[in-house]
Image (cartoon, rainbow, N blue to C red):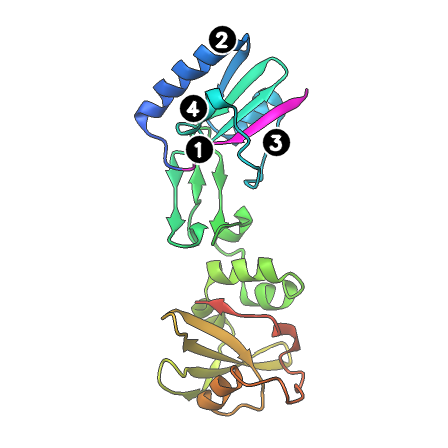
Amino acid sequence: MGLAYHILGSLRMRQDDDTAFVMREVNRLADEFGLRAIICDGPTEVIEKTGLAVQAYDYAAECLECLQSLRQHCHRIFIYDDVILVQMLPTRVLVAQGVGLHSTSEPALEYADGTKEYYVRGEQAPAEFYVPGYLNAEMILEHMRDNIDTQSIAIEIYGWPNILSELEAEVIDEDEPHIGTLYEASLGDEPFRLLKCVCGTGAEVVLPVLMSHTTALEANRATFADEDDEADGSIEFLTHLEART
């Protein structure tokens, strides 16, 4: 099977009139170009009917002139051999302003064929992260330490309040929200400190800080300082960790 074109269409919630338009236009194109038409409700049905497993969303929108209007009413168009195959729009789309597909509690995309896809700030997330009881603080902070992208997604879904509560984090010092609250927690026998504060955008973030910091103000100032002091090693496993709550 030779895939001649994969054309990325729209990404919005499917409307009642999309189905009628797609069926009419696809059948017209099939008749005009001598193609066999296949219309699918989602990615699972595409694989079942054709064996084509297209999971990424980073394909260039390489379009044929005659398909421009069709693209506005479907999610993907595949043209291969003597077939034109159309994947319909999702029935549910959840986005967050400025970050794209996003949901920390439910699928960001759902299709009529039952396919569900999960996204956090535009990045696809593992479905198991959304299963209650799957994530925990130790898994996120310790076992995901070598995969920063996955760790950030997990933190976004699980949430810092849950992590701090599970670790029974102790408040060392508390200041104004923009300065923050200094916590101490531990994983096994390894203690570490975190600063929770409100950044300039108004978002609440949690940052790893040195064990030598004793006040929230000192820890906050250190986040803006040059790294001219030798690290004490106590936060080595959290070096790249920074996430919104």
Mark 2 residue element: helix
Disc number lying in front (1 or 4): 4
Depth check, front residue: 132 or 142: 142
The numbered mark, 1 or 4, whose residue comes first in the sequence reads: 4
Left or right relative to 84: residue 96: left
The residue shown at (55%, 77%) is: 208
In this view, 73 is above or below 206: above
Depth check, front residue: 124 or 144: 124
- The residue to which callout 4 is attached is 70
Left or right relative to 181: residue 237: right
Mark 3 residue element: loop
Which residue type does callout 4 highlight? Answer: Leu
- The residue to which callout 2 is attached is 32
The numbered mark, 1 or 3, whose residue comes first in the sequence reads: 3
- The residue to which callout 3 is attached is 53
3 and 4 marks in contact (CB < 8 Å) = no
Which residue type does callout 2 highlight? Answer: Glu
For the residues labelled 3 and 2, the Cα–Cα distance comes to 27 Å
Q: Residues within 10 Å of mark 2 (few under 14, many from 20)?
A: few
- The residue to which callout 1 is attached is 111
Mark 4 residue element: helix
For the residues labelled 1 and 4, the Cα–Cα distance comes to 18 Å
Query: In the rendering, at what x and y percent does residue 61 appear?
Result: 53, 34
For the residues labelled 4 and 2, the Cα–Cα distance comes to 15 Å
Q: Residues within 10 Å of mark 3 (few under 14, many from 20)?
A: few
